[in-house]
Image (cartoon, rainbow, N blue to C red):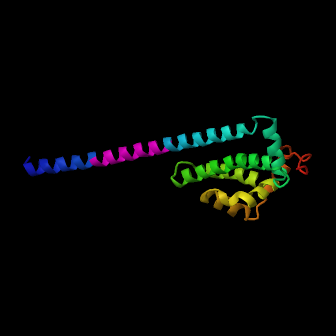
């Protein structure tokens, strides 16, 4: 065997090792991406549960939110402020979900699920009144998503039909 043959075999082995290394690296990157996505989605769900749990903090919170879903305009100023801050938590949380989706960190299913929750809340009668007043104050991605979907003709206000216990109809007319 001459040196040219040995060199050719060395180049062939080097090429095979290079291809194997690239393949292994791609598997590692994919695994890292899957782990990042899982971690992001777990974080989204945990943050959502904290926000949702805050609605159960006390009787005032539950009463104000139920009243606000029925009619934001019939809330007094303190209740409007409170409703704005609480509903704003959901909208701002959703903005974070949209930003993570743009980076490929959460699935389309996660965006759709979180989006449907926000659209159901903002699509309630009181949520729509609130959105007319405050919608433009939120970040661009969530505002565009909500405006596009509320304007699509879909019935996002069906929360009252699906979950009538979300509304306090006795206090809806009081302000």
Q: Against 61, is 157 above or below?
A: below
Picture mark count = 0
Q: Position of residue 76 (x, y in %)?
A: 83, 49
Residue at 61 percent across and 52 percent down: it is: 95
Task: Name which quarter of the figure residue 150 lies in.
Answer: bottom right
Q: Position of residue 67 (x, y in %)?
A: 84, 47
- Considering every residue shown, the one lying at the far front of the view is 77
Majority SS type along the magenta span: helix
Q: Can I make out residue 74 in this image? A: yes
The span picked out in magenta is 18-34
Q: Is residue 160 magenta?
A: no
Q: Position of residue 60 (x, y in %)?
A: 81, 38
Q: Against 57, is 116 above or below?
A: below
Residue at 49 percent across and 41 percent down: it is: 35
Q: Against 32, is 72 above or below?
A: below
Q: Is residue 25 magenta?
A: yes
Task: Name which quarter of the figure residue 153 lies in.
Answer: bottom right
Residue at 81 percent across and 44 percent down: it is: 64
- Considering every residue shown, the one lying at the far left of the view is 2
- Considering every residue shown, the one lying at the far top of the view is 58
Q: Position of residue 44 (x, y in %)?
A: 60, 43
Q: Left or right of 124: which side holds 11? A: left
Q: Can I make out residue 109 in this image? A: no
Q: Left or right of 175: which side holds 27? A: left
Q: 93 and 110: which one is in front? A: 93
């Amino acid at each position: 065997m001459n040196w040219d043959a040995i060199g050719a075999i060395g180049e062939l082995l080097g090429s095979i090792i290079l291809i194997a290394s690239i393949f292994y690296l791609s598997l590692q990157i994919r695994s890292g991406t899957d782990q990042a996505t899982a971690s992001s989605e777990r974080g989204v769900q945990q943050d959502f549960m904290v926000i949702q749990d805050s609605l159960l903090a006390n009787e005032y919170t539950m009463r104000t939110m139920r009243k606000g879903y029925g009619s934001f305009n019939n809330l007094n100023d303190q209740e409007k402020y409170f409703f704005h801050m609480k509903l704003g938590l959901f909208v701002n949380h959703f903005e974070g979900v949209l930003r993570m989706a743009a980076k490929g960190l959460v699935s389309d299913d996660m965006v759709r699920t979180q989006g449907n929750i926000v659209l159901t809340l903002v699509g309630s009668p009181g949520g729509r009144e609130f959105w007319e007043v405050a919608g433009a104050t939120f970040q661009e991605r969530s505002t565009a998503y909500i405006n596009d979907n509320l304007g699509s003709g879909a019935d996002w206000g069906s929360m009252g039909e699906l979950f009538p216990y979300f509304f306090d109809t006795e206090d809806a007319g009081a302000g």
